[in-house]
Structure formats: C-alpha cells, structure tokens
Image (spheres, helix red, strand yellow):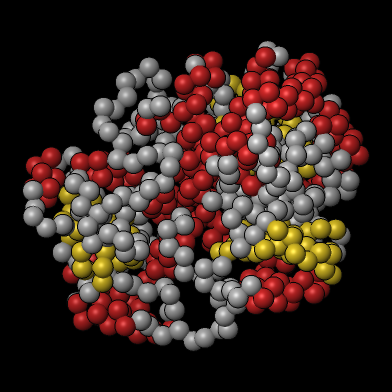
Amino acid sequence: MKCSSFCQDPFSYRRRLTREVRVGKVGVGGLHPIRVQSMITCDTMDTETCIRQTTELAAAGCEIVRITAPTVKDAQNLRLIKKGLLERGCDVPIVADIHFKPEAAMEAARWVEKVRINPGNYADSKKFAVKQYDDAQYMAELGRIRERFAPLVRLSRERGISLRIGTNHGSLSDRIMNRYGDTPLGMVESALEFARIARDLHFHDFIFSMKASNPKVMIAAYRLLVARLFEAGPDWNYPVHLGVTEAGDGEDGRIKSAIGIGSLLADGIGDTVRVSLTEDSVHEIPVAQALVAEYNQRSSGASDRSRSKRVLPFDPFSYERRATTQIEVNGIGIGGEETVRVLVRQQTFDGVAHKLSRMGDFQPEGVLESANLAAVDPRDSRAIAEINCSKQARFVTIKDRIDLPVITAYRLLAAALDPCHPILLKDTLLPSSDPDREFLATLLESATNLGALLCDGIGDAILVQGESSPSQSLRLAYNILQAAGVRIFKTDYVACPSCGRTLFDLQKTTARVKTATNHLKGVKIAIMGCIVNGPGEMADADFGYVGGAPGKVNLYVGKKPVKFNIPEAEAVDQLVDLIREQGRWVDVISQEAPAALARVTLAN
C-alpha cells in the first residue's frame, strides 16, 4: 500500500472526489459541499420534543438530523415525528440510529431518509469472549450477518433511502476483535464486511464512518479506510462521515474534535461531519460549520492530477514519533525521549511572569527569542542543506509569513530535514495581535494544525501564536497536547453526547464527575449514558460511569463492570471510592512553579 494512497496529495490540498449519495433532499459527496449534521438528545417516544429539537437544529444550520431508534416501538414513532416535522414545514432529512436490533432498522427504514447501523453490534455479539475462528467458522458468521443485513439493504434500495455503515472503535464485535484486535484495521474490516454485502445486492447508496474517542485512532482508521477503498477500485468511491465520538464538552471537546475532523479535512477526506459534544446539540453546529467553512470555499481539485513525488515523512496508518536528538534549550531538554515542550514568545512570558506559581501545569517551558532557532522556508533547499550539514543537532522551525499552509509547511520540513534535528511547531505562521479575534476560530485553527502534526509524529515543542492572551494561549497549548495524546497533565474524560438512549442527564453528571476528579493527573474516566456507549465505547478508559437503568449507574474498571445498579445520587461518591480502591486517588495539593521555570526566566 502506498503511503500517499490515503489522500490525493499529502503536500497539497485536493478534496477526495466520491460518488454522490442522496439523503433525502441533501446530496452528500460528489461536488456537494461538506455537510453538517447533529443528533437530538430527547426520548424518541416524546414526539413533540423530538420535533422541537429537530426544528431548532435545522434553524441553526444542521443539514441532516439523527434520531436514535433503539427499539421497534421507537422506530415506529419516527413516522409521527416525520409527519409532525413536515406539517411544520421542516423537511430536514432524518437518520435513524440503530445498534442492536435489525427489526428496529427495518421499521425505521419505512419512515426516514437514512439508517445508520453499527457493524460491531448489528446482528453481532460483544461479550469480550476470546475465541479462535478458523476460516470456515468465520465465513459461517459472515453468512449469518448477511441473512440479518440483506433485508435492510433490499428495503433501502426499494425505498430509495441511504445507509451509513458506522464503525465505532469501542464496539467492535468479538469476531473482529479476535481476528484483528482493537485496531484501526479491525474497524475498517468490520465496515467492509457490510459494504461487500450491500454491493453484492447492487446497493451503493451508503456512507462510511470510523469513529473513535482517541483522535490518533480515528485518524488512522479513516486513512486506512480511504486507502483500502482506493486499492479496491474506482467504483469504491463512497463518501465518508467524520466524527470524534465521545469528545466531551467545553474547550476540550472542541479541541479533540478539531484535531480529528480538521486534520482529515485538511487532507481532503470527509463529505459530512458531526461534532459530538456533551452539550445541547445546537452548540455543535457552529463548531462544525467553522471546521468545514474553509474547505467548502476551496476547489475540489481534479482526480486525474499527478501525486506529489515527495516521500511522506511518517507512516499515516500507525503513530510513531519522529526520532530526534535531544538538545538543551532554556535549560530544559527538547527532542529525543523528552516530552513535547511548550514555548512562548517573550511578550507572553512577561504577561504571566507575575503569576507563575499559581498556574499549575500551564507553565511556559522556554522562550522563543532565546531558543537559538533556525527558522527556514522548507522549499529553500540551500538553507535545509546547511542545517543538515551541521555537526550538532539544531532546533528548527518554519519562518513566519511564508505562503504555505501550516500542515504542508511542516510536512515538507520533516521530509527534507535530517531526523536528528528537533522541530518547533507553530499553530499559525501569522502571529495574532488582535485581542478581539473570536476565540473559537483560534482554537479550531490551532488544534487542527498542531494536532494534525502531533498525530503524524512530527514536533518536539509547540508555540501557540494565534492567540494574543498570554494565559489563554498557554492553556490552549497544553490542552492541545492532552487531546492529541502526546502529553497527559490532567484528568482525561471521555463523555458521550446525549441522545434518546441516555439514562441520566449527561451534562449535569459530567460536571459532577469532573468536580470530584479533575485533579487526578493521568487518569482517564469515561462517562457513558447507556449500555450502547458503555463498556465497548469506553475503549482505553481507566474507569467508567455508565447508565445501567433509569436512575441507576454501573461502575467499571477498564472494561470490567465491578459495581451495579448504584442509585444515581450515590454514584459519584462510589466512583471516588472505586478510584481509591484501585490506588489511583490522590488528594488535592497546591502546585508551585517547577524549578525548571526559574531556568526559563534566567535564560532570558
């Protein structure tokens, strides 16, 4: 497989051209703009609230609305919801979200424009069972799945509706897990099994998705999917829907979404997106619109244009940090085995110097002006050759204000630069001095550019210069490192967005869990509203807080349930007790500025 086969050209933006798939009145893929969608959060049996939330999303700019249909009864009520929407003049396409019940999918397909199924649990099992499947047993399982899936495909073809084959990292079936493991390859193979069944039945109106809460896993899975589709042939040019599942809320949720979605959009991958926040759904729309806006204004390019002949400086399907030589900058180690550092400009350092002892982990670790950086245009072969001839490792970055996108510039630099030289990443090559610039725009740009490069394994230090506020730029830098999974300095939360399956108020519950645990550095806690987004979707969380029944919570250590049917009022306290029992609890202590910070000050 060619490393560049995951996109048209990893050094120059060209949107991947796909076939068109219709979702009601909305065209997805082809020459259509990248579409924005979301999901309502109420009980599907509450017809009036479903209608209200759907119309609110449509008014906010949502182009496709998803509604959960966990049972046949819920699926039947989609008829009344759709009827009520049309009576109110709202013809936004509706997607029925199906997990475990093929019967619910068959009912829902009678009333909506699209049905989403999850290959990991649609007519399949998830019991964390360890079993060796020989080829005959594996094919027998595929035959059983075909029997359950084929009727939905035939009904969708007859009604002229579309399907989404939506794989989730945390809900791969036991069959896939036993053969491929909990991997991006397993995610892709799970989806392709269902796609082959659809194609055998001459059905092509489907869209893929490869969602995960870990942006690195999500990015690798989508790249691998697109590469496999490219290898399969030109008629496998199906659209893809992008999303980071269980991204969480607030700044962290937006950053994690931008890293996963934004980096793929920058490579021309993606025809429709959903930003999954643990907030009211209408708050997802402006984030999604901001992420796709730039690419909807660009030309899609031509599929017959030649690819770049440059060698990609990383494996796009498997994360590995670029190997460099450790050097000392401002009294701290950069590169080599050192963690990714945070640098600031002198002006930023001066703006926070008076409160360093109160800033906890959000500390500047180096000052740009005294870092002895070599700033280059990566197209300047003479400057690159001079650095590569150096007998000692140099600290290198990109010049400001050159006419290249950030991701392209640093990929070119990493491709040309000897691997011994550490690299400083910048979120933008146009430093901001505008205190009135909208912070969401800065956050999404910084997270997309820095996050994409960090997930590619490029970068030994970062500099946020798109945000003029000193404290805010430091916080943003550290939150990007955390969301990209390259430096953990605080509690990590995986929180699903609410939907009609949710068994408690996710927003309030997430806030309570965070209040009790947000000082636990390096602990990952999953907050899941139901069993669908429960043990499977928690992926690599250390602890899980999962809705088990109305008003009842189950607690997990990893993927193992250890406490059941806890009254919701007691569940947060029992989660704290469980963390203590597992030896992961620490009491809150005051944080002082580290000794290294004094060296930063003196170095200047």
Task: Name the quadrant of the N terminus.
Answer: top left
Residue located at (43% from left, 42% from top): 318
Q: Position of residue 571 (x, y in %)?
A: 77, 71
* Vertical side of 596 occupied by 544: above or below: above
* Residue 64 can be seen in this image: no
Left or right of residue 260: residue 468: left
- 571 relative to 37, above or below: below
Looking at the picture, how far across and down is residue 171, in whole percent?
Answer: 67, 44
Q: Nearer the viewer, residue 374 or 584?
A: 584
User: Quarter-wise, where is residue 415 in the image?
Assistant: top left
Q: Is residue 490 visible?
A: yes
Residue 447 vs 39, above or below: the answer is below
Residue drawn at point x = 44 percent, y = 38 percent = 317
Q: In this image, 3 relative to 209: left or right?
A: left
User: Where residue 110 sits: x, y (%)?
Assistant: 84, 26
Q: Position of residue 510 (x, y in %)?
A: 68, 65
When asked about the image quadrant of residue 473, the answer is: bottom left
Please determine whether, in this image, residue 367 is positioned above or below residue 313: below
